[in-house]
Image (cartoon, rainbow, N blue to C red):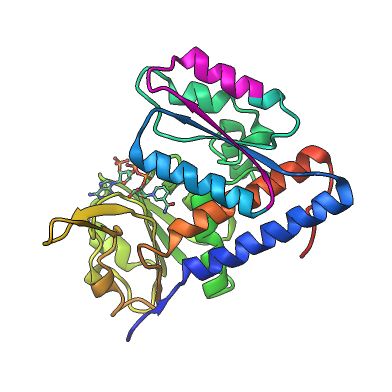
Amino acid sequence: MTATVIDGKAFSARVREKAGKQVEILKRQHGLTPGLAVVLVGEDPASQVYVRNKGKATQEAGMKSEEIRLEDTATEVEVLDVVNRLNADPTIHGILVQLPLPKQVDEMAVLDAIDPMKDVDGFHVINTGRQAVGLPAMVPCTPLGCILMLKDTLGELSGLNAVVVGRSNIVGKPMASLLLAESCTVTIAHSRTKDLPDVCRRADILVAAVGRPEMIRGDWIKPGATVIDVGINRIPKEDGKTRLVGDVCYEEAIEVAGAITPVPGGVGPMTIACLLANTVTAACRQAGVEEPEV
Ligand code: NDP
């Protein structure tokens, strides 16, 4: 059996197009232009690429895009000053502080300072808590993208066994919480989990968010399972260049799974698309208007 490849690029294009149409309607009917500000502290090359891509996608969707760059020597107070200014800016509906932050800046303090209504990354404890108890919340973009792809692939998720490998605050835990909200039976695995291959083999839905190249092998996967590979790992090639791989050994997994996301071209593009969707949601909630149907 060869798995269906879940095309995150094509799916994300649809999500982005929908966000763009919603922006058009909000501008026309309510004079509302959703605005997203991205704060980058330091010169981390990967972060610079992400921030550039986010800014480009925001503009393509017709939104206001603001990019604030601070030196990697910036103090926590300087970062907090920027966040407070953006919190007070009525033209900015979403604030994203690109992680990681330099070591002199306390990440939790910065995330905590973002107005929860503008927290389009969904990392504020208020949003984490609201989501956990089933109240409307800003949901972290990567897990949100994974859930949208799972629903699109499988339809109803209720009753399925889901295993999430990884328990980070930004992917693993919110992913597990979203799957639970869909009435899956959820197991969260991590570095202390015993017999991880056996745990994975019980999964109808297997989400890998580990950060270890190709750790999950084909024989860890239940035949027909849906595999969502969140991992993005750069590994060396024979010619001295590098290539991106996920946390799942794709060549092996595709022979066993029912459906699988590739790396690149799976979860990655959905993350930015969901950021746009979250910014539209945030703008509507702040302006007290309903999200337009398109
Ligand atoms: P973290 O490093 O914060 O978390 C990794 C998790 O994996 C931890 O919970 C850790 O367990 C667990 N883990 C590590 N080693 C093992 C092991 N041998 N067996 C089982 N579990 C293990 O990573 P993130 O959650 O931030 O990211 C995970 C991956 O997803 C990375 O490759 C990252 O690049 C990628 N990513 C991709 C995004 C996208 O847009 N596609 C967005 C965000 C992340 P423990 O808690 O016990 O240490």
The residue positioned 71% from the left and 48% from the top of the image is 281
Q: Is residue 127 left or right of residue 290?
A: left
> Which residues are the magenta region?
62-85
Is residue 25 in view?
yes
Question: Which residue occupies the extreme bottom position in the image?
Answer: 1
**Is residue 3 shown above or below 96?**
below
The residue positioned 81% from the left and 56% from the top of the image is 25
> Residue 162 falls in which quadrant of the image?
bottom left
The residue positioned 51% from the left and 20% from the top of the image is 79
- Measuring from the top left, give residue 99's x and y in whole percent: 43, 34
- Measuring from the top left, give residue 216's x and y in whole percent: 25, 62
Q: Quadrant of the N terminus?
A: bottom left
> Residue 247 falls in which quadrant of the image?
bottom left
User: Toward the viewer: 231 or 59?
Assistant: 59
Is residue 290 in view?
no
Question: Which residue occupies the extreme left position in the image?
Answer: 238
Q: Is residue 108 left or right of residue 232?
A: right
The residue positioned 77% from the left and 45% from the top of the image is 284
User: Toward the viewer: 160 or 34?
Assistant: 34
User: Toward the viewer: 179 or 241?
Assistant: 241
**Is residue 34 shown above or below 15?**
above
Q: Quadrant of the C terminus?
A: bottom right
